Image: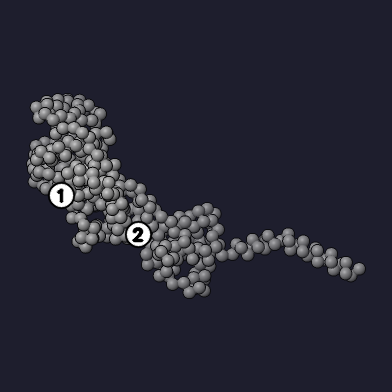
Amino acid sequence: MGKKIAIVIALIGILIVGLNWSRISSFLDREGRTINNSEVKLFLLNNTTVDDVVSVLVESGVLENGEEFKAYVGQNNVDPADFASGKFVILSQTKISTLVNGLLKGENGQGDLEVTVNVVFNRCKDIYDVAGSISKCIQADSISLIECFTSQDVLNKYGFTIEQLPAIFIPRKYEFYFDTDARMFISFMAEEFKSFWTSERMAKLNTIGLKSPSQAVTLASIVYSEQSKVEEEWSVIARLYLNRISKGQKLQSDPTFKFCWGGELDGVERLMGRHRDIDCPYNTYKYEGLPPGPISITPSVVVDAVLNPADNNFTFMCAKPDYSGRHNFTSSDVQHVKNARIYQNWLKSELKKRN
């Protein structure tokens, strides 16, 4: 009888433990976890202390007070210098041990919880615009980026003059770690540039009579500044300028002298002779051949249009007297004068309507 009672008591005990184990294990498991109930994205900067890290985690709603985090760091002799800088994603209810270890630098310098950031620099005019755009995405500030871009050792390393350097930047969406510094960034751009300029593209470069990739990008920047909306005109305009170069004619491109004025002519619809008279090496009304470097950061598709120019003998272009954004092309200077007069009269009429 006593034996049966003991068995019953044991069974009851097992049942009680079984019913409550989920609660017990849940209690134990809840210890040492983050308090966020959804994914949290946060940034850590260089040279942070443990208190700095805890402050970010608490402010981001990942930790309540950071005591367990600090305790784990202390018990495991974590060096604060080992915390990685960057953008991190903290999942809901992450264990403190996983959190700490995920914020530490791995073999590649990144933390296990670190993620990349999107970097885009479209529609930039020059390297200063690029630096400004990039500094909004990665930890490097615009000053350090410009200092890097313009340093002579960087220019020598990648084979550019300061004027040619905009050619190295191929605008598209990239993914970088947030803690990417200026030299890491320019190194990556150099690799992208090298990858773009395949043997096939280099062969086309020679075919059209240009001497270097930077010259092709420079011409592409002029083409794109003349025409940014109508894609089918890119190769036509490219051939037009190549025709002028081969004939020894000045390019006489309005965007080149506008570049010389910085942003002073932005919004000016009617450009005057005095605007074209500015003495500047980029002004193709004053100087023959291509400018010393690109006048904008140009999409690679426009560079490809330059490398694959249309077959024509045009040497003149003039905007059409409408709002299509298209141009009239001709090889006759007489016809060009007529086209220009028609456009000027139309523009004058349109400006009067607005006033």
**Amino acid at dot 1:** Pro
Where does label 1 land, which residue?
292
Nearest to the observer: residue 87 or residue 237: 237
Please name the residue shown 13% across and 30% down the image: 331
Element type at marker 1?
A: loop
User: In the displayed structure, would residue 247 be above or below residue 144?
Assistant: above
Q: Are marks 1 and 2 in contact (CB under 8 Å)?
A: no
Distance (Cα) linking label 1 and label 2: 30 Å
Please name the residue shown 73% across and 59% down the image: 19
Is residue 341 visible from the viewing direction of this image? no
In the rendered structure, the answer to whether residue 148 lies left or right of residue 107 reads left
Work out whether mark 1 precedes mark 2 in sequence or the reverse, and give the earlier one.
Answer: 2
Q: Which mark is residue 180?
A: 2
Please name the residue shown 12% across and 42% down the image: 284
The location of residue 141, given as percent across then percent down, is 30, 58
Query: Which quadrant of the structure image shows residue 110?
Result: bottom left
The location of residue 293, given as percent across then percent down, is 18, 49
User: In the displayed structure, would residue 55 be above or below residue 212?
Assistant: below
In the rendered structure, the answer to whether residue 74 lies left or right of residue 137 reads right
The location of residue 201, given as percent across then percent down, is 26, 46
The location of residue 137, given as percent across then percent down, is 35, 53
**Amino acid at dot 2:** Thr
User: In the displayed structure, would residue 105 be above or below residue 128?
Assistant: below
Figure quadrant of the N terminus: bottom right
